[in-house]
Structures are given as C-alpha cells and as structure tokens.
Image (tube, rainbow, N blue to C red):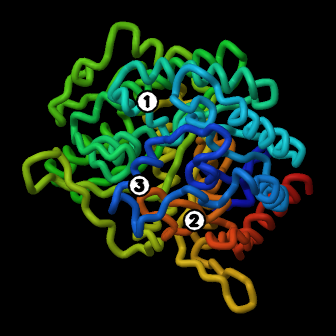
Amino acid sequence: MPNRLDLPGGFRWGVSTAAYQIEGAVAEDGRGPSVWDVFAARPGAVRDGHTSAVACDHYHRYPEDVALMKGLGLDGYRFSIAWSRVQPSGAGPVNPAGLDFYDRLVDRLLGAGITPLPTLFHWDLPQAREDGGGWLNRDTAYRFAEYTTVVADRLGDRVPAWITLNEPFVHMVYGYALGIHAPGRALMLDALPTAHHQLLAHGLAASVLGERNLEVMIANNLTPVRAASSDQGDLAAAAAYDALHNRLFTDPLLLGCYPDLSAFGVGPDLGGSVRDGDLKLIAGTALDGLGVNYYNPTRIAAPTEPGLPFAEAPIEDVPRTAFGWPVVPEGLRELLVGLRDRYGTALPPVTITENGCSVADEVAADGTVDDRPRIDYLAGHLDALAAAIAEGVDVRGYFTWSLLDNFEWAEGFHQRFGLVHVDFETQRRTPKASYAWYRELIAAHRKRLTG
C-alpha cells in the first residue's frame, strides 16, 4: 500500500492560516471593520465573548511566524488577505498601510524560500459591504473584482498563484442560512443567492487574475456524502445533500451549470439570481487548480420532520477530535477519487488546502506539547492522500490547517488546530510534537526522492 513517503516529486508541502484568525490589529493602520468584528461584539455570538482584536498578533509578529515556517522546510504558505485592511469600506479608496503589510509579508516569505499562496476572501467581508446587502447583493461581486485588481497589481509580480474564495459553502450556510457565523443572518434557503454571488465574484476575480497571467484557484470544503442505509429515502436525501454541499459550488465551475436543486424547491436560476452570461463568466477562466478542504465525511438520512430534504446522521465507532468531528482518513481518498470519477478531464489539479484537527493541547511542565492525536490524524490522512494519487488523482500539494493555534470563529480560542501552541496572553509560540513530526516528514520525503 502506498504511504505518505510515496508522494510524487514536485509535491508541495505547506501550512494554512486566515487573516481574521491570526492577525489581530483590527483597529490599526487604517483597517476598516469587518463583519466578524461586528458579529464578535454581539453578546453570546462567540463562546465566552472572545474576540480577535489581538488573536495571534501576527500583524506585528509575522517575522517570527515566517521563521517557524522556514524551520518546517515548507514549499508554500497559504494565508488570506483582509479586504477591509486594503479597502476599509470594501470599495473606493485604498489603504496604503494595509497593502504595505502584505507587501512585507510576501517579501519575507520569498526571502525564506517559501512561495506565497494568498486567498482573497476568507469570510471577513468589510462591514460596509454587509450594510449594503453583503453577498445577497450582486454588487458585492463587482466590488470584489475591484479589490482583486488592487491586490493583484501590487503583489502579482511576486505571487504566481491565487485563491479567490475560501469555503463559500460554509460561509453561505453558517453566515447567512443559520446565523452562527458572521454576518449572523438566519435566512435558511433564502440564503441561496449568496452562493451565486460568491461564484460570480470568483468568475470576475478569475478574469482579473487571468488577464495578468496569474494562476487561479478556489478552495471549498468538500465532503464525501454517505447514505445512512440503502433505503430509497436515505439515498435521495444523500443525493440532495451532495448537490447542496459539493455540487452547488463545483458544477458551475467545471461543468458550467448548477446541479438539480429541485429537492429544495429551487430552480436552475437559484430564485432569480442567475442572469444571462453569469454561468459562462463563472466557468470562463479555466481553473489552474482546485483547493480541497477536507475534515470528515457526512452521513445523511431521510428527514423525519418537515423542512429540509435531508437529516444528518451520526458516524459511529470512529475516533473524534476535540471539536467532536469524526476522524475518517479514508474519507479523503473517497472524496478525491469521487471528484475524479464525477468530473473526469474537467477536474483540474487538486491541492489539499486545509486538513487538520483540534486537540486539547497543554504545555507540560518541561515546556513541551505532546499532541500525538494530531500526528496520528495527519499521518492517516496523508496515507489516504497517497492512496488517491496511486489511483490516478492528480494532487499537487498538502497544506495542513494550521500553523498556529488561533481564533476559531464562533468557538473563540477554545479549539486548537496549530502545529505551534500559542499562549494568547503572552503570545509565546511553542512548537508542538506535530511540528517536529511534520518537519521530519517533509525532510524524509525529499531525501527519498533524491536518494
């Protein structure tokens, strides 16, 4: 059986972060408020009232964090750019100090031999855009294209590849349908226009990047969907959920059309959101790569109550992370092979842009952090990734989530995903056992390739 040391030559090793989760400095150097600043200020919105006002203080400590990345021997670093740091109102005047920060970060990464892989949007919409309707308003897609132009013109001479959006499915569901993430709207199926407007934003941004001969990617959270049984009701429910979670954000990009959403009472125009030419624009600039964020499979049963055409069923008899998520490494192989089988030659090269787990890490008396469950998690998923590649799936890299413990959205600082422990009071960074394991794995893989 292939394993993680059998990954091919040219395979890229990396880590991922997101601006709002690590940068802090939310009111410094002209940055405007984002939806997450406003949401986190609501009583009860974030566990224990945590905010990302300081987070990991990466805005000031990025040289230390780049040094940690260099110590791992990484090929690439996936981070996100805070739109409201570049354009405080999400449109109009540019904030030079915000662009300067990312300029310094890019140069520091390149000086360390690490290729930057920026994500243009990772959920932190400028609040001024949300006040104007947010992703429910088609105009936000056009403002996103303008923002993309500003950033690409400043950094594109040194940054060859870009990710437009991170996890538009999660942002739509948690932010607009259920209201448990910013901006905190609870619209249920009325949130579906945000899917189309995010994809429209991707298409417009992809055109901007393509005109500058820059590579274009998008990253989404994808999940293999398993029916709870062979009963027809469970199978139909699983198909409906797969269409919503996976195909809604992948079919338009690769096939130029939306999947059948009739189970949700929605036609192919997503409630009137789709206009002539939109789908051609969304699929118009070929993807140079598809970013896949994988955490676990999803088990689906027929609904027992009116409302949605599916119900989530628990996955039994598997380990769970500190977040309570099931640990199923085989699901990554299943997902990747399923993408290849579904999309065939339309599927571009894949990069795993997020994969990792929360562990109840503690610093021991000797100053070490022994996070063996995380090591086991990463090892299992990398072995599953090697198996998918052996079955013919073109996977070019793996970016684990995350470099640092950080602000984990509605969970605040309670869930730790990092290879590096962060004391949020002192900002002290302590590399965990998983940091050393990942460093040694990268070195061993390179040594095996060179003999």
Instruction: Report the residue marked by disc 2.
Output: 417
Left or right position of 180 against 112: left
Image quarter hosting the N terminus: bottom right
Nearer to us: label 1 or label 2:
1
Residue found at the far top of this picture:
276
Amino acid marked by disc 2:
Phe
In the displayed structure, 341 sits above or below 61; it is above
Left or right position of 122 against 23: left
Identify the residue at horizontal 61%, vertical 16% (top origin). 208
Name the element at disc 1: helix
In the displayed structure, 434 sits above or below 40; it is below
Instruction: Report the residue marked by disc 1.
Output: 129
- Cα separation, mark 3 vs mark 1, equals 18 Å
The residue lying toward the viewer, choosing from 86 and 429, is 86
Lower position in the chain sequence, tag 3 or tag 1: 3
Left or right position of 229 against 14: left
Q: Residues within 10 Å of mark 1 (few under 14, many from 20)?
A: many
Residue 353 visible at all: no
Residue 196 visible at all: yes
Residue 420 is drawn in which quadrant? Answer: bottom right
Instruction: Report the residue marked by disc 3.
Output: 41
Identify the residue at horizontal 43%, vertical 38% (top origin). 168
Q: Residues within 10 Å of mark 2 (few under 14, many from 20)?
A: many
Image quarter hosting the C terminus: bottom right
Residue found at the far right of this picture:
451
Identify the residue at horizontal 73%, vertical 68% (top origin). 435
Nearer to us: label 3 or label 2:
3
Amino acid marked by disc 1:
Arg
